[in-house]
Amino acid sequence: MNYSLVFHQEALDEIQDAHDWYEQQRVGLGVEFMAAIGEVVQRVLSNPTSFPKEYNKRRKALPNRFPYLVIFELHGDVVLVVAVIHSSRHPRRWQER
């Protein structure tokens, strides 16, 4: 099955904020973060049901090297990314999306 990808606006904002923070830490690190997010999203799109269900119907995927969670829902052939958060953040910050 081919899956479509949709990002919640707040998830896009979280990705941008993390990119900016990493880029301030070291030039190029933000680009590496974006690549890691891109890789995990590709893994999700290739087989979204292989990721564990948590937070009710939502699933999580972990990018390599960065302590972030990509939280997504599967709606038929649509993968909806609802949050991209640091793994130490409390889930209440995004669960109402």
Image (cartoon, rainbow, N blue to C red):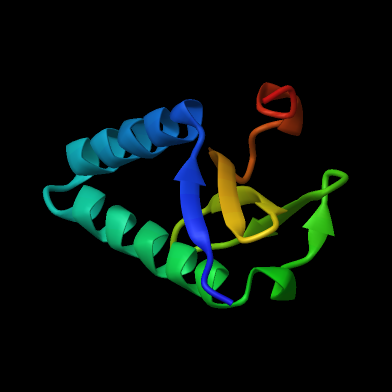
Q: Is residue 9 visible?
A: yes
Considering every residue shown, the one lying at the far left of the view is 27
Number of dots carrying numbers: 0
- Residue 81 vs 79, above or below: the answer is above
Q: Residue at x 53, y 65 (%)?
A: 3
Q: Quadrant of the N terminus?
A: bottom right
Q: Residue at x 49, y 58 (%)?
A: 4
Q: Position of residue 39 (x, y in %)?
A: 39, 69
Q: Is residue 64 visible?
A: no
Considering every residue shown, the one lying at the far right of the view is 56
Q: Nearer the viewer, residue 70 or 57?
A: 57
Left or right position of 66 against 87: left
Q: Nearer the viewer, residue 19 or 54?
A: 54
Q: Nearer the viewer, residue 56 or 78?
A: 78
- Residue 3 vs 75, above or below: the answer is below
Left or right position of 53 against 69: right
- Residue 25 vs 40, above or below: the answer is above
Q: Residue at x 72, y 31 (%)?
A: 90
Q: Residue at x 69, y 55 (%)?
A: 74
Q: Position of residue 93 (x, y in %)?
A: 67, 23
